[in-house]
Every structure is written in C-alpha cells, then in structure tokens.
Amino acid sequence: MDNRNKQTDPAAARWNERYSNEAFAYGEEPNLFLKEQLSQLPAGKILFPAEGEGRNAVYAAQQGWTVAAFDISQEGKTKAMRLAEKNKVTIQYIVGDLQALDFEEEQFDAIALVFAHFPPNIKSLYHRTLSKYLKKGGTIILEAFSKKHIDYVTANEKVGGPKDIDTLFSVEEIKADFPGYEILELTEKEVELHEGLFHNGTGAVIRFVGRKQ
C-alpha cells in the first residue's frame, strides 16, 4: 500500500474533495457499457482500478463476482464501502498507487477500466502492469473518453472528463498498450452520459473489450 501523506498528493487531494460530498459524484448505478459486458461473462475474480466511489465494483459483487478495487482517494473508499454495505455485498478496496500494491500475476478473470484516466506519463505503464494481473483467456473491459472528447467538454463542461488531450485515449494507443489481445470490440463513438453529478451530456468515448491470449 502507498503510505505517502495523501495531503501532499495534489491528485489525491482533488479526488478526495470531489468525493467528500454526500451525493455520489458519478451516481450509484453502474456504467451501462460495463453492465452490458459483465452480463456476457461468467462470474469470477475482477479488478476495478481507479474505482472511485464504488458504483461499478458494488454492481459486480451483486452479480456474484469476487471484487477487488483500488484508488488513490480515501474518500472514494469510504463512499464505496458505504455503498457496499447498503447493497449487502463485500468488496476488497485498497487505497494506494498501482505500483505499490501487491496483486499477483494472472490473479483476475477480468479487469474493468471505467473512465480510469491515469496521468499521461504513466498510463501505458499502468495498462501493461494491469495486463500482467489478468489470466490468459481473461477479459479487459474499458470505456474512457477519447481524444475527440476535448471538443465536447469544451462545449459542455457538465459532460465531464479530462481537459488535457494527452490524458484522453485513441484507438491506436489502446492497441499499443494491450498487444497480444484478441480484440472483441474496439470502437470510438459518441454517447449520451447520465452518471451522477459530473457525467451529463454528449461525449466521445473509446470502448475496448479484449481477451488475453
């Protein structure tokens, strides 16, 4: 676990502030693309990186998955554990940076990256690291804002998402970050988001589903 003082970490402080409100920043309901994809898989062990307030992890647990999640925000974990208790499910949730966590190689049947926008200088490293934790034959499920989204968030801040184009995704980056995967879906599309307080409106996303070879 990352034992740094989170008060000195600007990113952690920003997310702690966002998650400190009583209302859930992105709602309590799961991401629709994740929900659709999980319905097609047998339940197993799943990891949720950058899981925030736990809406997706809790949903997976409700569907019978054994759930692990992590985030840099302690406030996010507090909300997630409260949501899990409300829904009478159990999730493992760790606060820390990925490189400091003790996950094992080929530990998970699925990894779900739902708007998990890591800083540009580490996002490819994080993707490659996460890939090691996925079993052969396991599934990556990813939905995140595409580079085209910069125009959407500029026009409507309520849709949310990074305003730094290097933090956003392209199809080419996903292909490069997840080599050796059977691509079941890899698309860039316009979507309507209605997720809590901070994802509302029309945006542009990358959707990727890959099976590890």
Image (spheres, grey):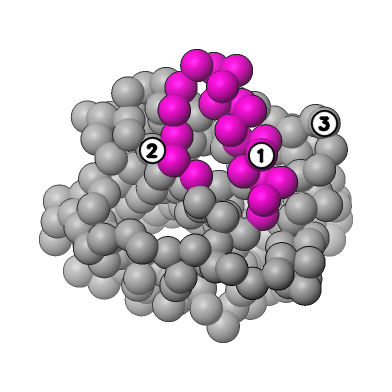
Q: Is residue 9 left or right of residue 127?
A: right
- Is residue 127 positioned above or below 16 on the image? below
Between marks 2 and 1 in the image, the one whose residue lies nearer the viewer: 1
| Mark earlier in primary sequence (3, 2) | 3
**Residue wearing tag 3:** 22
> Residue type at mark 2?
Val
Q: Which residues are magenta?
A: 73-93
Q: Residues within 10 Å of mark 3 (few under 14, many from 20)?
A: few
Tell which tag, 1 or 3, sits nearer the viewer. 1
Q: Secondary structure at mark 3?
A: loop
Q: Which residue is mark 1?
A: 78
Residue under the point 28% across and 40% down = 45
What residue appears at the point 51 percent right and 35 percent down from the top-left corner? Answer: 56
The residue pinned by badge 2 equals 67
> Does residue 146 show up?
no
Q: Is residue 174 left or right of residue 80?
A: left
**Tags 3 and 2 touching, CB below 8 Å:** no
